[in-house]
Image (cartoon, rainbow, N blue to C red):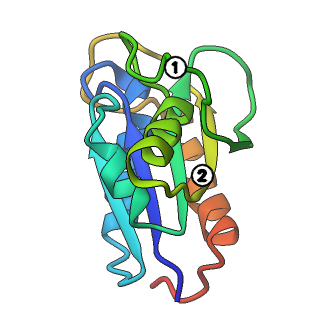
Amino acid sequence: MSIDLVVGYGNSLRGDDGIGRVVADRVFNWHLSRVRSISIHQLTPELAEELSRVDRAVFVDAKLDGDAVSVEPLYPDESNQILGHSLTPRSLLGLSRWLYDRVPQAWLISVPGECFDFSDRLSPTGERRVVEVLDRLRLLLEIADIP
């Protein structure tokens, strides 16, 4: 049985920037033994260890532009810049490879937001996109048994 990880990140006090975190929280509520979920403000080096322990990882983040949710495969950043000022999903995968010699299959789901003002709530568009992302996650992670 494969172990999957969903990492939702963003600022939950900036409206739709918290979309990734809402997705991760809802995945946590699925209570599936093979799916782990992490909701965080920003990516940190400690996530590399968690990545080394799973078979597949999906990062979910809001984006400012665009009008469609996108899903793209991720590969480790092979440069020596993996501990730069800001971490990316690719740099974390590179760090996992460097420290633990293990990298999961990974994807980034980028979700266009509508409102990034100070708010602890998603916009109606953001809420609809969360539902869309959860449907895509079910397909991507081959999950059929969600209540």
Question: Residue drawn at (61%, 86%), measured in percent from left and top?
Answer: 144
Q: Residues within 10 Å of mark 1 (few under 14, many from 20)?
A: few
Q: Please state which of residues 49 and 14 is positioned toward the viewer in this rendering.
A: 49
Is 61 left or right of 33, judged from the image as shown?
Answer: right
Whether label 2 touches label 1, CB < 8 Å: no
> What type is the residue that disc 1 sits on?
Asn
The spot of residue 19 in percent (x, y) is 44, 37
Question: Residue drawn at (40%, 13%), measured in percent from left and top?
Answer: 84
> What type is the residue that disc 2 sits on?
Val
The spot of residue 128 in percent (x, y) is 57, 45
Question: Label 2, label 1: how many angstroms apart (C-alpha)?
Answer: 32 Å
Image quarter of residue 108: top right
For the C terminus, the quadrant is bottom left
Q: Please state which of residues 30 and 119 is positioned toward the viewer in this rendering.
A: 30
Disc 2 is placed on an element classified as: helix
**Tag 1 or tag 2, which sits nearer the N-term?**
1
Q: Residues within 10 Å of mark 2 (few under 14, many from 20)?
A: many
Label of residue 133 in the image: 2
Image quarter of residue 47: top left
On screen, 107 above or below 124? below
Q: Please state which of residues 138 and 92 is positioned toward the viewer in this rendering.
A: 92
Q: Which residue is mark 1?
A: 80
Disc 1 is placed on an element classified as: loop
Q: Nearer the viewer, mark 2 or mark 1?
A: 1
Q: Is residue 127 visible?
A: no
Is 17 left or right of 47, judged from the image as shown?
Answer: right
Label of residue 89 in the image: none
Q: Please state which of residues 83 and 40 is positioned toward the viewer in this rendering.
A: 83
Is 117 left or right of 111, judged from the image as shown?
Answer: left
The spot of residue 26 in percent (x, y) is 37, 60
